[in-house]
Image (cartoon, helix red, strand yellow):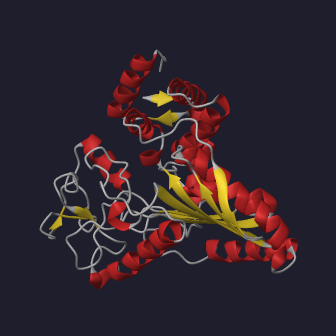
Amino acid sequence: MIFSYSRLFEFTQSVLVKIGCPEKDAQLAADVLLSADLRGVDSHGVARLSGYVRLWEKGRINSKPDIRIVHESPSTAVVDGDGGLGLVVAPYAMQVAIEKAKNAGTGWVAVKNSNHYGIAGYHAMMALEHDMIGISLTNASPLVSPTFSKERLLGTNPISVAIPAKEQPPFVADMATTTAANGKLEILQRKNLDAPLGWVQDKEGNPTTDSNGVKKGGALLPLGGDREHGSHKGYALGAIVDIFSAVLSGANYGPWVPPFVAFLDPDPNPVGEGIGHFFGAMRVDAFRPAEEFKTHMDNWITRFRKATPTPGNEKVIIPGDPERELEAERRISGIPLLAPVVEDLSQLGDRFGVKL
């Protein structure tokens, strides 16, 4: 089924208000969540709304958090999210990083005591309108096995970097440090499809194409899938995100990260507070004149667009191109939702008296 952005926004905002979020927070959270659907990251959009409600019902999300800075220097800060929606905590923290960068050239903010924050790209892109480079990292549910391990010790731990240009659209990289995010598995599960080889291993550590493999005790694989294809690099990237997001901030890290998924329970002996994020904002003119930099970014992007494509491919794309093009299309034609997602949202709406 196809839904307009405005209809899904109104529905999402209304549900969040019903669980106690102030109107302003509900609007912001809906904006972050729907940005994923607009950009084609369907695994992190309204399909996850019921997951946030479930965590709220279990007392794991504070709908009225007192988000605050608990430690800072001229260019750095640690933010305590007070158990709030990551969809609200993360934009607050990124704005702190931007304000720090305005004064110091760069701003760096680590966050503890938060929850799942939606797509990493939303927060990184906040820096673009200020002629800044934005960086967004977060740790996540421990569903990923390090290279050579059967244990689930890391999350999908995404990285996003947004870089402004002049005439060209911005460069926006937004990626998990696993071969595929868990949300991609959830989409395959709704469609009753297998996963590609290299995404998942079973509970014994053997490769599997079962899209329910993680629920059955298996694990997601680091970027690369196996050592021969570079999984040790994906493992290292995921570890860096975990350390920056949590060891630095005082959040839970590794296998202690409170899971978003329903089939796992939080560790009863946490090593920190909530989920952790890390944000950076870098003023371009702290390095060279902004217009000069953006002109050269245009040149960089243009040259890469002109790269000779391999057989069977039409063109070389720039990170952020597919999402930007899909957003332009979906703002006009609407957002497609799979039948299981529509059913889930309808049931959620019935519970709270909100019509989908």
Which residue is located at x 47 percent, y 76 percent? 240
Residue 14, image x, y percentages: 55, 24
**Quadrant location of the N terminus in the rendered image:** top left
Residue 314, image x, y percentages: 51, 66
Q: Nearer the viewer, residue 2 or 218?
A: 218
Which quadrant holds residue 155?
bottom left
Q: Nearer the viewer, residue 311 or 104?
A: 104
Q: Is residue 126 visible?
A: no
Q: Is residue 204 visible?
A: yes
Left or right of 153, for residue 234: right
Which residue is located at x 59 percent, y 77 percent? 307
Classify 19 as above or below 288: above
Residue 239, image x, y percentages: 42, 74
Which residue is located at x 34 percent, y 31 percent? 339
Q: Nearer the viewer, residue 198 or 333?
A: 198
Q: Residue furthest bottom?
A: 228
Number of numbered markers: 0
Which quadrant holds residue 172?
bottom right
Classify 154 as above or below 183: below
Left or right of 290, for residue 304: left
Residue 245, image x, y percentages: 51, 66
